[in-house]
């Protein structure tokens, strides 16, 4: 009977939410930082350090590999290229192949060196170091299964020099393209931001909702986690909603303001709120105004009547 080998790559252990600047965890290993940004100088070496900690009860053996990566769709997840030969920053990176042995409760530091060529063009370069853990203990008569987990540490590198920063808002609006509401919530569609420059950007800002008198009634922070948008890619950011409309009534404007490096962008959308509470208040105010007007007119007419002369 033929034996066969199947490799299962544990993508659940791959750090997909790599644009959140918090430590990542895979099984018993903690990696800090989860993502690394650094500046490179053409013709010079630059070294970065990654710290690994074994939080488990058994020793861990890791090997390393370097891969290219790009943005995956518009979610912000990285797309690791396991098949192609390293290029750009991945080609410049030097890291020990391992095995790296970490005892339980211990930490170790791994140096990652970039030997940037003298002719490297200014701009952004993107690569990742993968720390691999394997367990080939599961063996049966029919199959030999190797379960392998990978922890990814992406590097967002910028070669200093003259490069272009560019970005634009390509979609901002209300869910379903609604223009009026009788009740909350006022829900915004995801913001879509396109990077048109040479380096990654982290667009941050807020949405300010103002009433017809220019008063701000609600502010929503955008991209608090500092998610990055890679060059030549589009990324979606959740905007959120305005839930408690209260006595809101009339025309409102939602203005989005984003800043990413030297790039600033704005966009706006108008909508109407005709809530029941707002309508009742508006009717009451209207009746009071009519009453005051009638009262003033009657008072003025009495003063000007012949009997009062």
Image (cartoon, rainbow, N blue to C red):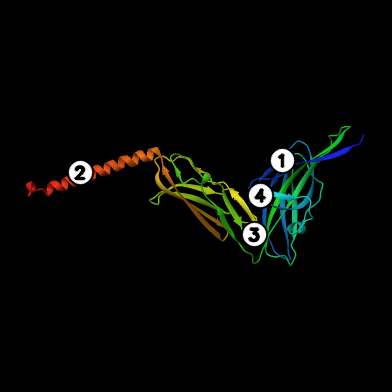
Q: Identify the mark at residue 233; answer none if there is no mark.
A: none
Report how far apart the C-alphas of labels 2 and 3 lie in the structure.
Answer: 68 Å
Q: Seen in the image, is 295 located left or right of residue 126?
A: left
What is the secondary structure assignment of the residue under circle 2?
Answer: helix
User: Decide: marks 4, 1 in contact (CB < 8 A)?
Assistant: no
User: Decide: marks 2, 4 in contact (CB < 8 A)?
Assistant: no
The answer to whether residue 228 shows anywhere in this view is: no
Q: Seen in the image, is 141 located left or right of residue 294?
A: right
Disc with the residue nearer the chain's start (2 vs 4): 4
Kindly report which numbered mark, 3 or 4, lies closer to the viewer in this rendering.
Answer: 4
Report how far apart the C-alphas of labels 1 and 3 lie in the structure.
Answer: 28 Å
Q: Identify the mark at residue 73; answer none if there is no mark.
A: 4
Disc with the residue nearer the chain's start (1 vs 3): 1
Disc with the residue nearer the chain's start (2 vs 1): 1
Report how far apart the C-alphas of labels 2 and 4 lie in the structure.
Answer: 66 Å
What is the secondary structure assignment of the residue under circle 3?
Answer: loop
Report how far apart the C-alphas of labels 2 and 1 lie in the structure.
Answer: 74 Å
Disc with the residue nearer the chain's start (2 vs 3): 3
Which residue was labeled with disc 3? 199
User: Decide: marks 3, 4 in contact (CB < 8 A)?
Assistant: no
The answer to whether residue 14 shows anywhere in this view is: yes
**Where is residue 236 shown, x and y percent of the image?**
60, 49
Q: Identify the mark at residue 295; answer none if there is no mark.
A: 2
Q: Identify the mark at residue 12; answer none if there is no mark.
A: 1
What is the secondary structure assignment of the residue under circle 4?
Answer: loop
């Amino acid at each position: 009977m033929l034996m066969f080998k199947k490799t299962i790559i544990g993508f659940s252990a791959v750090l997909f939410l790599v644009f959140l600047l918090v430590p990542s965890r895979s099984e018993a290993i903690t990696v800090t930082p989860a993502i690394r940004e650094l500046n490179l100088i053409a013709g010079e070496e630059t070294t970065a350090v990654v710290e690994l900690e074994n939080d488990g009860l058994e020793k861990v053996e890791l090997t390393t590999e370097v891969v290219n990566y790009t943005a995956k769709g518009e979610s912000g997840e990285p797309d690791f290229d396991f098949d192609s030969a390293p290029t750009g920053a991945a080609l410049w990176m030097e890291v020990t192949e391992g095995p790296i042995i970490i005892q339980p409760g211990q930490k170790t530091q791994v140096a990652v060196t970039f030997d940037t060529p003298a002719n490297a063009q200014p701009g952004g370069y993107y690569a990742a170091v993968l720390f691999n853990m394997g367990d080939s203990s599961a063996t049966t008569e029919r199959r030999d299964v190797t379960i392998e987990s990978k922890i990814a540490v992406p590097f967002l590198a910028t070669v200093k020099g003259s490069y272009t920063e560019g970005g634009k808002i390509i979609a901002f609006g209300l869910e379903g393209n609604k223009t009026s509401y009788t009740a909350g919530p006022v829900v915004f569609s995801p913001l879509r931001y396109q990077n048109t420059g040479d380096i990654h950007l982290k667009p941050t800002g807020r949405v300010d909702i103002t009433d017809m008198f220019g008063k701000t009634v609600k502010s929503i922070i955008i991209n608090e986690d500092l998610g990055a948008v890679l060059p030549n890619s589009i990324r979606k950011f959740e905007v959120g909603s305005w839930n408690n409309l209260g006595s809101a009534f009339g025309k409102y404007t939602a203005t989005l303001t984003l800043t990413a490096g030297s790039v600033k962008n704005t966009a706006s959308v108008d909508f109407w709120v005709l809530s029941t509470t707002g309508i009742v208040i508006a009717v009451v105010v209207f009746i009071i105004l009519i009453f005051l007007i009638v009262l003033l007119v009657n008072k003025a007419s009495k003063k000007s009547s012949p009997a009062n002369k």
